[in-house]
Image (spheres, coloured by chain):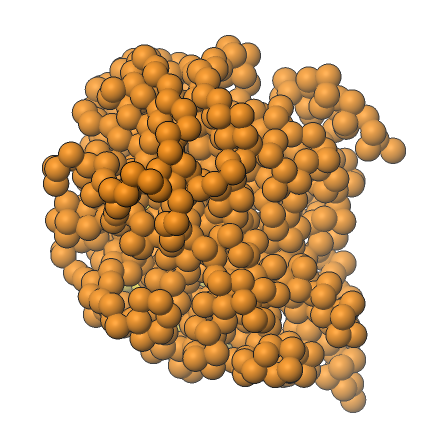
Amino acid sequence: MIKVNGRDKEWEENITVDLLLEKCKYTFPLIMVKVNGKYISKEKYKDTLIMNGDDVQVIHSIAGG
Amino acid sequence: MVEGNKENQKLLISFEFEPGKVEKGYTDRRLYINLSENKIEEKSIDREVKETFTGGRGYGIWYLWDAVSSKTKWNDPENEIIFCTGPICGVTQYSGTGKTHVVTLSPETGTVNDNNVGGYLAPFLKFSGWDLLEIQGKAKEDVVIFIDGNKGKVIIEEVQGLNSDTYLLIEKLTERYADDEKDKRNLSIVSSGRGAENTNLGILNVTWYDVRRRKVRIKQAGRGGTGSVFRDKKILAIVIKYAGVNAGSNNAAYPELITEAGRRLTKEILGLDHVQNGMREIGTVNLLDHMQNYHCLPVHNFKFGSHPDAFKIGNKVWHRRMTQNQAGDSCWMGCAMRCSHAVDEFELITGPLKGEKVLVDGPEYETTAGFGGNCGCFDPDFILEANFYCDNYGIDTIGVSTTMAFLMECYENNILNKEITEGLELNFGNKKAALELIHQMAEGKGFGKIAGLGIRQIKKILVEKYGADAKFLQDIGMECKGMEFSEYVTKESLAQQGGYGIANKGPQHDESWLIFMDQVNNQIPTFEDKAEALHYFPLFRTWFSIVGLCKLPWNDIEPEDNKKKYHGMEAAKVPEHVENYCWLFEGVTGKHISPEELILQSERVHNLQRLFNLKMGFGTRKHDIIPYRAMGPVTVEEYESREELYNQQLQEIIHFDIKNKTTEEKVKALRDYREEQYQKLCDAVYKRRGWDSNGVPTLENIKKLKIDFPEVVELVKKYQS
Ligand code: SF4
């Protein structure tokens, strides 16, 4: 199990940040990802593996109405 | 007058005044007009009012409070329509400083309403010498109010036989009042249209002159029926003329602070807008794709949050349709955000201007989502036609589209039928019927007479006259306090449900927009977190309206490292922009202000507005109730459209055993839970705001805010348990 934005989510083996965003349907272009509090730059989404028990934050920078 | 026909014009009154003297952002005087008595006066703004309410909407609400009694109705002569400027209004070195804020009693809600609108009106008004324009009474025939800010003259003329619709009227008035082409940029006109006369959904259009296109452009004061008040007072138009705006027009105390704040923001906009929100490319409609992708786009009267056809009205479409000139246009001088866009040469296929090629201002996100998603008409040409005619007729695209979506659901549920609609087949997606209904509403004809009343009154008619199920209509009629919801699906964001329901004027997102912070980012998980957000953000946003600002440059652009430097709610505040605002306020007025003092200034105005609701017989807990459609799935169809999500919530959050349960049983279990959550949210928000459990500001709070005027204290005492 991992946490994504504070909510439980099943962990899958070999899941990267990139794949997680796709699974969660996080399509918004302006997001900031932190894994266990550590900022992950966009170029590293493909190679950063998420481990079981990780705490992932995906913050959408949207102003809205 | 307008067409040179002297018989059709009659001078009612003229008035001379000392042209503008702005000192540190203020003129300290207001222009008072009484149309019943043909009276024009200069009135001062008391020092105490200035100290307490700061300016703009703060002044507007205070003077309206003074002008009306608890019995006053929106169409009584004593109701006022007040155009407000603010101390920062008109600054040309910082983006988004041209907004006019308008205050009046609303025909939709029966209580105080506020709007903000772009265009050149407020800066011209202030530089002419007036912090406020306050109009009371009613004229007998249509009038044009002309204010010449350079010559120091106000003229009110009676004008007969002119069509009030905006599109042609503003062109005529511009030709009439501008000395030459160059002088057109010195005019700003307020107008409305016949839709405002025949519905409760009237808007004001405020102009600015597009030098590049040589065309008059418009922005709208849209919500709550302000335009209906305007036309009820028989104001055809207000024309203001002022030449000579420059960087020193506000006589600012410390111009260097303003310049520094402006430099910082402009650099961000120019360097980052194209990778952030693309406001310069397509404006607010950039939200469309994101709302669709995150299930927040209202579809079929807010039943669903997305639709497979949404791409037909998505961002790429508007990139193609909006005229691209590298960036959009500024609705006030010096705004680098340039989020005002237009579609040129759009050929109309219906209505009185059928066949004409016109300029359509916008469309904004709300219009696109309302007519496109909510009414199920995923067609950009339809949206443009509906947008144009609503503006032209002076009716609110949000109010009209949300009302229409409600009517469509009623039609599809056989609550309405062709007999009642006089032949209109109001199914979702029927563009022809939707356009016909807009024309009928504007003309006050056919079924349009009923549609133009707005959802609250329509529900009553459907129940009383046609035996409709009142409870179902309450569930699906997306209004609160009498105002229609703006265009976001809030089912999965409790904070935004409160943002809509507890908002002072009704469910318009300009008080707070917390959907992503809550639903997606999950940054405010507890009731206390949500209450904190529903304390801070409505107050912060209120501040724009008391000093004369546009909200967009606050968070539709942000410093590149904002989210790295700050976290959670702090990041959402955009601290460096808050600092800019403190510099701006100090730069103009000379008074140092901290971010906390800024919130305090707003808190006084926001609480007075809540108390104003109370004075008019609203403003308690029961008036903050929202229809269940805003909280969760009303119908089996809705539940089943996101069954996986709802089943999961029932099991994991509520620990409800879904085995062998019918969908109806699951709908009920979810509903019981969500309604309870909403009440708990109200408890938390009221507590955080210093209100009692009935939602009434406590005596202690109003004393702390120094708004404990005798009339206010007396009112609050009546509600103390
Ligand atoms: S951000 Fe847009 S709406 Fe606001 S002042 Fe600038 S151009 Fe006008």
Q: Position of residue B676 (x, y in %)?
A: 76, 58
To which quarter of the image does residue B354 belong?
bottom left
> If the image is split into quadrants, where does the N terminus of chain B sit?
top left
Q: Position of residue B108 (x, y in %)?
A: 61, 50
- Residue at far bottom of view: B660
Residue B40 lies, with reference to residue A13, above or below; the image says above
Q: What shade has chain A been given?
A: yellow
Horizontal arrangement in the rendering, residue B423 relative to residue B96 (left or right): right
Q: Position of residue B233 (x, y in %)?
A: 52, 39
Q: What shade has chain B been given?
A: orange
Relative to the observer, which residue lies in front, B199 or B84?
A: B199
- Residue at far top of view: B47
**Is residue B602 shown to the viewer in this render?**
no
Q: Position of residue B203 (x, y in %)?
A: 46, 50
> If the image is split into quadrants, where does the C terminus of chain B sit?
top right
Tell me what residue is drawn at x 32 percent, y 36 percent. Answer: B239
